Image (spheres, rainbow, N blue to C red):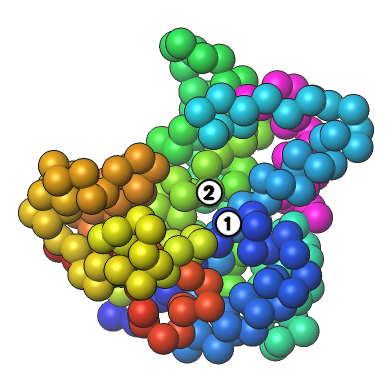
C-alpha cells in the first residue's frame, strides 16, 4: 500500500508569515502522498473584530452564529487556505484548497443544542475517502479548511482536529496513513514543566495508566482518545509533535 502523511497544523503556525514559510518548506519535503489540514482561529477572531462582530468562546470552542459563520468561511476557506495553496505552489507542490463541502468529502450534522448552543457548528457523520483518494492519486495535494456541510446547502464550522482524524480514517482503506498533529510542545510530556520529558511511544494500556496517574490530563485526553480511535479505524500511526519536527520523526508516537 502507498504511504500517505496527513499533517494537521493549528492556526497559530499558518497565520504568521515566518512560521508559515517554515512549515510549508517542511511539508513540501515530505515524500509520497500528503494532505494538510489547517486551523485559523486567531485570524477569524481578528477579522471578526475589524467587522465589529464579537467572538464568543465557551470551553475553548467558538460559538458560530450566522455572522460568525460568514467570517470563518471567508477566513478559513479563503484567506488562510489560499495563502497556504499559493505558498505550496511556489514550492512546486500541486495543492488544492478545499472544504468538506467540496466533492462532498465531509458531511456533518449541526451540533444538537444541549447545555450550550454552539450555532452553526458541525459534527462529522460521513467522510468520503474514495473521491479524495482518486484526487490524491492524480497528484493533487489537498489542503483542507475546517469547514464542512450538511448536504442541504448549509456550511458548518468544524473542529480541525476532528477533520484531520475523520479524513485520516476515511483514507485508511486506500493508503498506509500516518496522521501527524502539530502543536506547540515537542510531544506528550511526562512532566508538563519539562519540555524535554517527551513520552516517545504510547499504546492504549499505557495511556489508561497515564490518565489514572494524572500524567496525561486536560485537553490532551480527548486528543489522545481521538488518536486511538483513528488507530482502531485502520490509521497506521498517529504522531503528536512540533511542526519543526515533522521530518525528524521526533515526538510521541501513538500505536495499537
Look at the magenta stretch and give its main secondary structure.
helix
Q: Which mark is residue 178?
A: none
Instruction: Give the x, y percent position of residue 93.
Output: 66, 82
- Judge whether 171 appears above or below 18 on screen: above
**Label 2: few (<14), some (14–19) or many (≥20) C-alpha neighbours in 10 Å:** many
In reply to whether residue 2 is colored magenta, the answer given is: no
Q: Residue at x 25, y 72 (%)?
A: 200
List the residue tagged with mark 2.
160
Looking at the figure, which quarter contains the N terminus?
Answer: bottom left
Marks 2,1: beta carbons within 8 A: yes
Determine the secondary structure under disc 2: helix
Instruction: Give the x, y percent position of residue 196.
Output: 36, 72
List the residue tagged with mark 1.
10
Q: Nearer the viewer, residue 252 or 196?
A: 196
Q: Residue at x 68, y 51 (%)?
A: 40
Q: Name the quadrant containing residue 22.
A: bottom right
Q: Residue at x 80, y 55 (%)?
A: 79
Left or right: where 202 falls relative to 128: left
- Judge whether 91 appears above or below 6 on screen: below
Q: Nearer the viewer, residue 94 or 206?
A: 206
Q: Name the quadrant containing residue 222.
A: top left
Q: Nearer the viewer, residue 245 or 106?
A: 245
> What segment is highlighted magenta in the picture?
63-79
Instruction: Give the x, y percent position of residue 7.
Output: 49, 67
- Judge whether 126 appears above or below 170 on screen: above
Give how far apart the Cα atoms at labels 2 and 1 are.
8 Å
Q: Name the quadrant containing residue 38.
A: bottom right
Amino acid at each position: 500500500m502507498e504511504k500517505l502523511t496527513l499533517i494537521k497544523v493549528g492556526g497559530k503556525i499558518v497565520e504568521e508569515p515566518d512560521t508559515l514559510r517554515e512549515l510549508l518548506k517542511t511539508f513540501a519535503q515530505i515524500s509520497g502522498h500528503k494532505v494538510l489540514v489547517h486551523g485559523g482561529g486567531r485570524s477569524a477572531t481578528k477579522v471578526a473584530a475589524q467587522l465589529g462582530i464579537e467572538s464568543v468562546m465557551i470551553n475553548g470552542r467558538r460559538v458560530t452564529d450566522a455572522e460568525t459563520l460568514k467570517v470563518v468561511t471567508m477566513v478559513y476557506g479563503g484567506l488562510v487556505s489560499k495563502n497556504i495553496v499559493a505558498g505550496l505552489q511556489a514550492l512546486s507542490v500541486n495543492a488544492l484548497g478545499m472544504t468538506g463541502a467540496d466533492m462532498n468529502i465531509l458531511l456533518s450534522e449541526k451540533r444538537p443544542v444541549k447545555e450550550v448552543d454552539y450555532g452553526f457548528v458541525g459534527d462529522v457523520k460521513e467522510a468520503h475517502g474514495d473521491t479524495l483518494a482518486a484526487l490524491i492519486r492524480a497528484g493533487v495535494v489537498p489542503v483542507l479548511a475546517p469547514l464542512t456541510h450538511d448536504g442541504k446547502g448549509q456550511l458548518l464550522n468544524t473542529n480541525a482536529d476532528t477533520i484531520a482524524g475523520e479524513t485520516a480514517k476515511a483514507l485508511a482503506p486506500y493508503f498506509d496513513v500516518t496522521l501527524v498533529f502539530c502543536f506547540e510542545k515537542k510531544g506528550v510530556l511526562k512532566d508538563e514543566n519539562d519540555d524535554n520529558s517527551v513520552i516517545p511511544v504510547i499504546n492504549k494500556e499505557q495511556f489508561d495508566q497515564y490518565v489514572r496517574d494524572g500524567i496525561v490530563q486536560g485537553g490532551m485526553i480527548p486528543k489522545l482518545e481521538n488518536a486511538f480511535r483513528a488507530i482502531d479505524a485502520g490509521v497506521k500511526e498517529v504522531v503528536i509533535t512540533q511542526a519543526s519536527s515533522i521530518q525528524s520523526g521526533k515526538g510521541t508516537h501513538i500505536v495499537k
